[in-house]
Image (cartoon, rainbow, N blue to C red):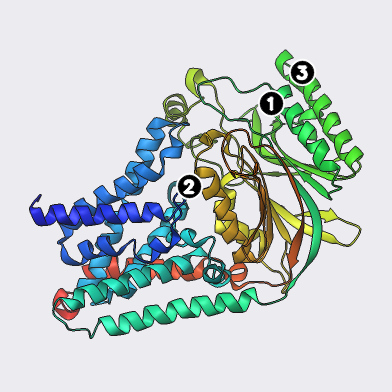
Amino acid sequence: MFTWLNMINLGLALLSALLLTAVFPPVELSFFAFVALIPWLVVVSRTGTKTQLVISYLAGLAFFFLNDLWIVPITIPGYISMSIYLGLYWPATGFLVQRLLRRWSLPLFLAAPAVWVSFEYIRSWMITGFPWFFLGHSQARNLSLIQIADLTGVYGISFMLAMINGAIVELILSSKNRQFRRAIPALVSAGVALLATFFYGQFRLHQTTTRPGPVLAVVQEDFPMFVDTDAPDCDEILQAFMAVSVQAAQTHPDMLIWPETCVGVPVNPEFLNATVENKGDKSEQRYARGVADYLGKHAKRSNSYLLLGALSRQINPPGHSPAEDKFNSAVIFDRQGNYMDRYDKIRLVLFGEVVPFRYTIPKLYWFLNEHMTPYGKGGYEYSLTAGREPKRFTLVTPAENLRYSVAICYEDTMSDLIAGFVSPVQGKKQIDFLVNISNDGWFNHSCELIQHFYMCVFRAVENRIAVARSVNTGISGFVNPDGSIEAMMTDGSRIYGPGIRGFLTRQIKIDSRSTVYSIIGEWPVLVLTVLVMAFGVVLPFFVKPDKIGK
């Protein structure tokens, strides 16, 4: 197994892992995305199945162990198990690429992008999903190359990049025997794809389709979060955000936006007006009423809507299981200081916010709650309840009434969810802009912050909506409907790191365009994935090799 040739192959695969790492922040050498897969694809093309599986898995492990490091401050066991799981995508991708090459004689410049993108799609939802480190994400700053996201989502960008990698490998393999019959159409096709992507991007960027929208202010404080230490006092956090928000209010925004979970008590009327029995709940209820009144007065004094992240509690009737539901919510106060509405997060983070099998296998649920979560020891049950529906809110301004939705934390990485918020009805988008609130204080001022910000670039282009982000520890800012970054929170020299706090106020742009992606969502990549699985996994069991070529 470990011959000199295979050691060279392993070195090539690891080189791909390093090159692919370099395309993402903090290194952010995006041009490496055009060649990063080449060494690994050479290995896939010239090795047997077993050798490929081993080498690709080692490369996949190296990539995810290196790039998932920002998970360590939250959970080391989670970091290890997650990287071990995610590493499996590399050998699985290599296996199906080999199948399409050798069983169906599909050219590498088509097989590689088809399989790579299919597994990006599967990874986006499998086991609650990890839609991170997609090849297309590397081009977040290259506006001309990302505009096709309004047709295909980020998957189209990944496909184009993987196609170029595959075409170059075709050229390398053809050069050995100087027979370029396969390389020439591969290079031409990849070149056409690149040029089409670029010129479509230029066409979109030169369209004039936006108008001035509402003025929004995003507030950022710096409260790092740690699993093994006590969280900052609720009053301390509230007063810190209020101090910055008072300054932001002086810029006269239509809406003030605070981050996820910046208010540590439930301020929803269902809890404030509920009949509670135990002393702890009564004490919390009294305190929460004071906080809700405090927030309402701030909104009224500012003559602004106030949107912020808070826990919501709903006490259930006697005999109901569970006795109460807790939600990760975005709550809204109107200009008069009245509690207006809330959105409850739909896509919860596995083990971070919810433990599985709560209702189906209670014994397994309690075991996982005790041993696989950061806060479940001693029987404390912290699982949240998922929101039941997407919500769209109205922001009333002197000029016009505008619709918006809120994505909480990692929901902004889930392109299908955001497209569902926007999905046009009778040709009109259901929302005009998106608000993302997050608490990235768990990630120790790491490169996760900028990686997370870039996700909103793609949500903006896919749906042609502006995005406003308010994030504890950062990065807060604004993204325009064409994916350009309007503003990012900075201290003058840095955009992430300890101690960056403040606010940004911008008049966002409203784009009148509806997009193909908002309408059809992920159907194209779903069809592609089904075809890849059919030809790579299912059909080979029914069709003999001698009927489909070498």
Distance of mark 1 from mark 3, alpha carbons?
17 Å
Distance of mark 2 from mark 3, alpha carbons?
36 Å
Q: Nearer the viewer, mark 1 or mark 2?
A: 2
| Residue 505 falls left or right of residue 146 | right
Which percent across, then down, holds residue 75? 44, 31
Name the residue located 40 percent from the left edge and 45 percent from the top edge: 67
Residue 337 in sight in this render: no
SS assignment at label 2 = helix
Which percent across, then down, holds residue 198? 51, 76
Name the residue that disc number 1 marks: 318
- Give the amino acid at mark 3: Lys
SS assignment at label 1 = loop
SS assignment at label 3 = helix
Q: How many numbered marks appear?
A: 3
Q: Earlier in the sequence, mark 1 or mark 3?
A: 3
Which percent across, then down, holds residue 440? 58, 39
- Give the amino acid at mark 1: Pro
Name the residue that disc number 3 marks: 282
Mark 1, other Cα within 10 Å: few <14 / some 14–19 / many ≥20 = few
The image quadrant of residue 530 is bottom left
Tell whether label 3 touches label 2 (CB within 8 Å): no
- Give the amino acid at mark 2: Thr
Task: Indicate which disc residue 128 carries.
Answer: 2
Above or below residue 450? Residue 179 is below
Above or below residue 427? Residue 353 is above
Q: Earlier in the sequence, mark 2 or mark 3?
A: 2
Distance of mark 1 from mark 2, alpha carbons?
32 Å
Q: Nearer the viewer, residue 246 or 53?
A: 246
Tell whether label 2 touches label 1 (CB within 8 Å): no
Name the residue located 32 percent from the left edge and 68 percent from the top edge: 112
